[in-house]
Amino acid sequence: MIIYLRPFLIFMLMTLVSLAHAQTRVQYNLIVKDTIVQFSGKKRHAIAVNGKIPAPALMFNEGDHAVIHVKNEMDEETSVHWHGLLLPNLQDGVPYVTTPPILPGATRTFEFPIKQAGTYWYHSHTNLQEQSGLYGSIVIHPKKEPTKADKELVLLLSDWTDEKPEEVLRTLKRGLEWYGIEKKQPASWNKIIANGGFKTASGNPGYCMPLMDISDVYYNTFLINGLPQEQQLTGFQPGEKVRLRVINGSASSYFNVQFAGGAP
């Protein structure tokens, strides 16, 4: 009897081992569509994913197998790049470099193993679609959390201009100081001359860029998870430990994040 059971026991053991190492398939369906938004008092064309800006947060566990279906319901091609993820080159999402673009009306399925943990984001790599709202967060929990947290909070920071992104790029290429004036930070020519930088500054238009090349653009507003920057985050109780994930999903802005609620 034992001799006949031995192959069966071996088969069962191998099956259990296989199930223990099997990857959990986590699927998402993302629909990319044109929309109109009004973040700062002026209506502007934007791009929404599943009707949202930013796009839905994608949640995984380390070791999962991601299956993400992206449907393009716009009249132009699009793409999705999984920023910072370790994955096969064909799944990277940069059109005409690693991955074919997603044509109008088409659906592309991205499929790859989740080999890491941490906080990442995804966004379009087609033209200036990222600046129109095609971006979202990615959260990957490790197999073993280093620190236990009661709750998690993801803050996706972004900048927003009421101008068309193409107009912003055109203004930058003209080398104009208009955005500096709007920010009340125009170039100070007296200081440039006093520091011996007149020759360099006066030759700068040849590079088709304004004098300041960091945070050149004036933005009408800044968003946190697609909402105005001044907002109250509720749902937390005294004594709870919160894991805070902060993503800079802006086009060109730097953010200074401070904790002002007492001892962290």
Image (cartoon, rainbow, N blue to C red):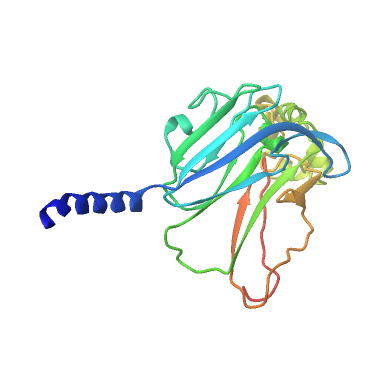
**With 152 as the anchor, is 132 left or right in this view?**
right
Q: Within the image, what quadrant is residue 231 found in?
A: bottom right
Q: Within the image, what quadrant is residue 39 found in?
A: top right
Q: Residue at x 44, y 52 (%)?
A: 62
Q: How many marks?
A: 0
Front-most of residues 178 and 49:
49
Tell which residue pokes out farthest to the right in this image.
Answer: 41
Front-most of residues 197 and 2:
2
Query: Looking at the image, is 139 positioned above or below residue 35?
Result: below
Q: Quadrant of the C terminus?
A: bottom right
Residue 37 position within the rendered picture, expressed as x and y whole percent measured from the top left: 81, 39
Residue 26 position within the rendered picture, expressed as x and y whole percent measured from the top left: 51, 45
Question: Is residue 199 visible to us here?
Answer: no
Residue 211 position within the rendered picture, expressed as x and y whole percent measured from the top left: 71, 36
Residue 54 position within the rendered picture, expressed as x and y whole percent measured from the top left: 69, 44
Q: Quadrant of the N terminus?
A: bottom left
Question: Is residue 156 visible to us here?
Answer: yes
Front-most of residues 251 and 242:
242
Tell which residue pokes out farthest to the left in this image.
Answer: 3
Front-most of residues 123 and 235:
235
Q: Residue at x 69, y 34 (%)?
A: 201
